[in-house]
Amino acid sequence: MGKLRILIPKGRIFDNVSRLFAEAGIPISLSERTYRPNIAADWLDGKVMKPQNVGELLEIGSHDAGFTGIDWIRETGSNVVEVMDLGFDRVRIVAAVPAEMDEAALRGKKLVVATEYVNLAREWLTKKGYDFRILRTYGATEVFPPDDADMIVDNTSTGQTLRDNGLRIVDTILESSTRFVASKIAMADPEKKAQIDELAMLFKAVLDGREKVMLEMNVNKIRFPDLVAGLPAMRSPTIAPLYGDDGYAVKVAVPRHEVPILIPQLKRLGATDIVEYELRKVVP
């Protein structure tokens, strides 16, 4: 079986993806001034590229799978298979203008719109009926208004950078997050598809593990029925008799965010010696 050729973007996405691989049991490291990461799996071959290029490189088949924001897949119109939404690096692609500029001012002139998202911007501006000219940028788009542009189309996570530069958001064009995507050519190859599916299974197990914790507790026989009836579980709790026939040890995986409410409830239901610990992976 040949190696699966994967693309990992630079910057913040690389950090999050490499952490995901590490938690899946496949550490990745990248030396300075190199674009070939070391991957602790002999069936994987990686390359680091800009997120803007990932979709098109997968479409032409020079690589098998990769990671990028759905914003760049939509911007480039790349014909790829979305394997899964990893859920991190969430941003919004927004249109923003100087805070003092109202809708009448926007409609009263031919707008200069600064953006890296040329295609997404053009589609949105045309749909809204604006008269416009697009000025392509290469980073730091927020500095263009008001001297060099009337509007920007850019990505933001909190909107704070836009506010700091005197801009207000007029519309959200797209909500984006990092996706695990694959070449259609690779997905048509049974061996490559099996490798991609294996990675997706590991990633899902890690992401599910991040969302859950394990609770372990003891309960006496009298309180046991009420406790079990009040337990949430992925399927059913794991139950074992305690030494000396004094009751039961109970384990259950629960959503992390429910723990502050759940532990007091379990105490009221008779649980003792409650222990909470992390899960590394959850494989249904």
Image (spheres, grey):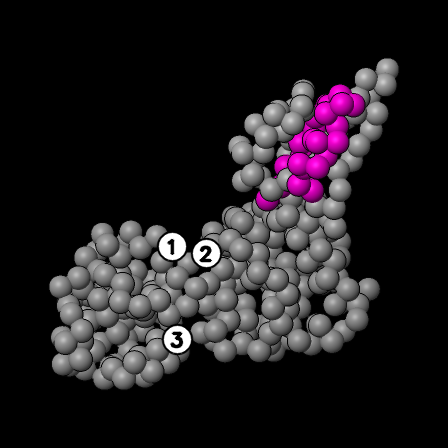
Q: Callout 1, which amino acid?
A: Ser
Give whichever of 125, 62 is nearer the camera.
125
Residue 142's disc number = none
Q: Label 3 amino acid?
A: Leu
Whole-percent x, y for residue 36 in the image: 60, 56
Quick one: label 3 or label 2, which is nearer the N terminus? 2
The answer to the question of whether label 1 and label 2 lie on touching residues, with beta carbons closer than 8 A, is: yes
User: How many numbered marks, from 0 up?
Assistant: 3
Tag 2: amino acid: Arg
Residue underneath mark 1:
157
Q: For mark 3, what is the residue?
A: 120
Task: Mark 3: give few (<14), some (14-19) or many (20+) Cα within 10 Å.
Answer: many
Q: Which residues are drawn in magenta?
A: 210-233
Residue 158 visible in this rendered orientation of the protein = yes
Q: Which badge, 1 or 2, is on the more N-terminal residue?
A: 2
Residue at the (32%, 83%) spot, across then down? 126
Residue 158 placed where, x, y %? Answer: 35, 52
Out of 236 and 282, give the one closest to the viewer.
236
Q: Judge from the rendering whether residue 270 lies leftward or rightward of residue 170; answer left or right.
A: right
Mark 3 and mark 1 lie on one chain; the one further toward the N terminus is 3
Identity of the residue furthest to the top in this view: 244
Q: Secondary structure at mark 2?
A: loop
Residue at image point 74% right, 76% down: 188
- Structural crowding at the residue carrying mark 2, measured as other residues with C-alpha within 10 Å and reported as few (<14), some (14–19) or many (≥20): some
The span from disc 1 to disc 2 (Cα, nearest Å) is 7 Å
The one of 166 and 35 positioned closer to us in this rendering: 166
260 vs 204, nearest the viewer: 260
